[in-house]
Amino acid sequence: MEFIWLYLLALTVGVALGKTEKLKPVSKALPYVTGMLIFIIGVWAGNEIRSLMVIASLVLGSLEILIPSTLAGYIIALGFERKTSRKRGSYSKRAKAPFLFLSAAILGWALGSLIVVPSAESLVTDLLITLVIVIGIDMGPSITISSFKRDLKNSWIPFSALSGALIGGLISSAVFGINVKFALASSAGLGWYSLDGPLLSSIFGPDLGMIAFLSNFLREQLTFFLVPLLRNQKGVALLTLGGCTTMDDTLSLYASTLGDEYKELALFNGLILSLIIPFLIPGILAL
């Protein structure tokens, strides 16, 4: 509980600092801090997990989280959606950052399996607080009254994604016997693997932290595959698949595959989810 309050304090401080024009360039450090944190988590995991069978079980565990939460959000959105006009476009190129982060995790894991780093766990906590402050600085300029008023009629899109994630988390817990707090918090990441994985690692340890990281990472990659495949179906409901990544990594995918008119909806969906998730996950953990 003490860590959760520290996390929320760091996030609040970051958001406040983000309102300062001079500190905006600090947000450019976000991918570097994230990459370093994921690398250290990989080292920590490598120190603790060295069996291929355990690694396979982690991948399976991530799918047990991913599939119910993603499917539930999409089904709920289909219930809300009305007929929408859309254009078909070309397929987008995948973002490079996710693969760099995955490479950091793999390299860290490889190093940790060879060399014991006693300070890895404490480094994770320190880097996580640093990451949260930088995330707050990055979010600061976006948190305004106008950002909440914009496109309120489309608030059912992030609502569908969030409610689907929570329902999916409960299903994962009930069907697969996963700790209910972990299942809910992992599902609630909605593709934000660089936040959810490190945060849950600090609470549940490196093995479950890796499951959280993988389930959210694979959600983003699944989006790149499913959106072009399902583009002839209900378009707006597809925004729930990308979760909070619809405002950055998968934005061009939605615009090029479904049409430019989806760009604003994708930005709105990703923005609202990105503002809620950093507070929602600690709230779940504090229950």
Image: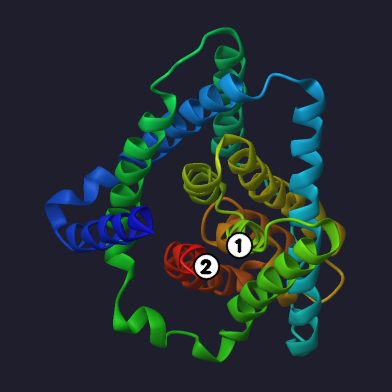
Q: Residue at x 75, y 62 (%)?
A: 173
For mark 2, what is the residue? 284
Figure quadrant of residue 85: bottom right
Are the residues flagged by discs 1 and 2 in contact, CB closer than 8 Å?
yes
Q: Residue at x 58, y 42 (%)?
A: 209
Which structural element holds mark 1? helix
Q: Is residue 285 visible?
A: yes
For mark 1, what is the residue? 181
Above or below, comparing residue 280 to residue 5 in the picture: below
Number of other residues with Cα within 10 Å of mark 2, as a class: few under 14, some 14 to 19, many 20 or more: some
> Identity of the amino acid at label 2?
Ile
Above or below, comparing residue 190 to residue 240 in the picture: above
Which quadrant holds the N terminus? bottom left
> Mark 1 or 2 closer to N-term?
1
Question: In the picture provided, is 91 more to the left or to the right than 193?
Answer: right
Figure quadrant of residue 125: top left
> Identity of the amino acid at label 1?
Lys
Q: Residue at x 45, y 63 (%)?
A: 282
Of 92 and 273, the residue lying toward us: 273
Residue 42 image point, x, y percent = 55, 27
Residue 79 image point, x, y percent = 79, 87
Above or below, comparing residue 228 to residue 106 in the picture: below
Of 18 and 180, the residue lying toward us: 180
Q: Is residue 94 visible?
A: no
Number of other residues with Cα within 10 Å of mark 1, as a class: few under 14, some 14 to 19, many 20 or more: some
Of 181 and 61, the residue lying toward us: 181
Which structural element holds mark 2? helix
Question: In the picture provided, is 32 more to the left or to the right than 183?
Answer: left
Report the number of discs. 2
Figure quadrant of residue 18: bottom left
